[in-house]
Amino acid sequence: MTPEELLAFDREHVWHPYAPMPARHANHAVVSARGVRLTLADGTELIDGMSSWWAAIHGYDHPVLNAAIIDQLGRMAHVMFGGLTHPPAVELARTLLDLAPAGITKVFFADSGSVSVEVAIKMALQYWRARGVDRPRLLTVRGGYHGDTFGDMAVCDPVNGMHHLFTDVLASHVFAPEPPAGPDEAYTRELERLVAEHAHELAGIIAEPIVQGAGGMRFYDPSHLRTLRRLADEHGLLLILDEIATGFGRSGELWGADHAGVVPDIMCVGKALTGGYLSMAATLCTDGVAEGISASGEAPLMHGPTFMANPLAASVSLASLGLLAERDWRTEVKTIEAGLAAGLEEARAMPGVADVRTKGAIGVVQTEAPVDVQRVQAAAMAHGVWLRPFGRLIYTMPPYISTPEEVGRITAAMTAAARTLA
Ligand SMILES: *Cc1c(COP(=O)(O)O)cnc(C)c1O
């Protein structure tokens, strides 16, 4: 196919995320990627300000990650996980548990972040079922995002999520207001009231720790996470933390929960787990959760994806976690944070800009009105940068290997994009 034929067929026949079919706008064809750069079919090079949806933390075409997959490919690409196991899965589980907060001891491998949240919800529900207690609901906070499957959608923000499309079929959960950016006594009282009112029907509490990602790129005060942990303990509820976006250093700590010194009962990891190479996620939990589900002898955890613990994905995840352990990611993320804060400051005063904020390797320009995605993207691409804004958000989550110069290019592109709002 010529590049033109490829784009024409893509537009007519290939569905893209959150997009109509046929597509309203042509996509851009990428032919290769190396380091922090994507190369388009016409030879254009773009710095990837998105890390391919926050996953490619070590950049593209990394020799260590490539070698891990090639090496594993020489042994086996895949084998079923039912009744069989293999070194990459077991070694990855051990590495994950070494990294996870103390008390987290069990791993369930899922094939995507959304599925890992489904599994977390199922764990919480089965935990109570195994005790013969009917607790079918969860408490969560507004502004969250936990994935696109039905169980997950039901705990996503009810306004900016997809509730309005599926109100009649989604499970009904309890929503607390969005956690404020600073400490807030009134908010604490509201959480206390809501949990006390609903505790009898709640299996657990689910939230993204500190950073609310796709639900609005909001950062909230760690004290609210401590309140959720305290209330879960007081009422005997399970605390599920979705670390899919925050995990592996993105927010400046290894886990989002580390900002608050909180340990969840169940946690989800994904996105950066494989360094952005393949689809893999995991649901981790404590002995207590595993025992609670399994002790009654009633039903085991009823989940088992076909591609569970895929050896290629597990191998590249192990290599990615190895790279993370070797590199001074904390300093890299801090340096990126400083670069983002300095580079985006100028946008704060621009007309149409409501807020500018950074946390770890996350930089956000929030706009007053929903952005014209095509226009923002064109402005960023004119500066040699790939961005994928949504809603009122022009944001970046660059790869950790981004140099200060590359971060400067990204913030220049974002401010240029913000200038188009006027
Ligand atoms: C991206 C994301 C998910 C969904 O992960 P997928 O791999 O896209 O299914 C769930 N929770 C959070 C916090 C995410 O950022």
Image: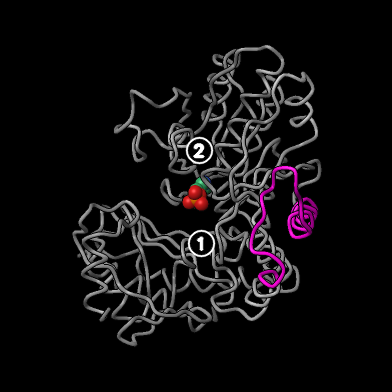
Task: Kindly report which numbered mark, 2 or 1, lies closer to the viewer in this rendering.
Answer: 1
Q: Position of residue 257 (x, y in %)?
A: 66, 46
Tell me which residue sits at (59%, 16%) in the image.
135
Q: Is residue 96 above or below residue 291?
A: below
Name the foreground residue: 375 vs 42: 42
Query: Is residue 95 magenta-colored?
Result: yes
Q: Is residue 352 above or below residue 57?
A: above
**Residue linked to disc 2:** 179
Q: Is residue 235 above or below residue 283?
A: above
Q: Earlier in the sequence, mark 2 or mark 1?
A: 1
The answer to whether the residue bearing label 1 lies less than 8 angstroms from the nearest atom of ligand 1 is: yes
Question: Which part of the image, by quadrant, shows the N terminus?
Answer: bottom left
Tell me which residue sits at (65%, 75%) in the image.
70
Tell me which residue sits at (51%, 62%) in the image.
54
Secondary structure, mark 2, is: loop
The answer to whether residue 115 of the structure is visible from this angle is: yes
Q: Residues within 10 Å of mark 2 (few under 14, many from 20)?
A: many
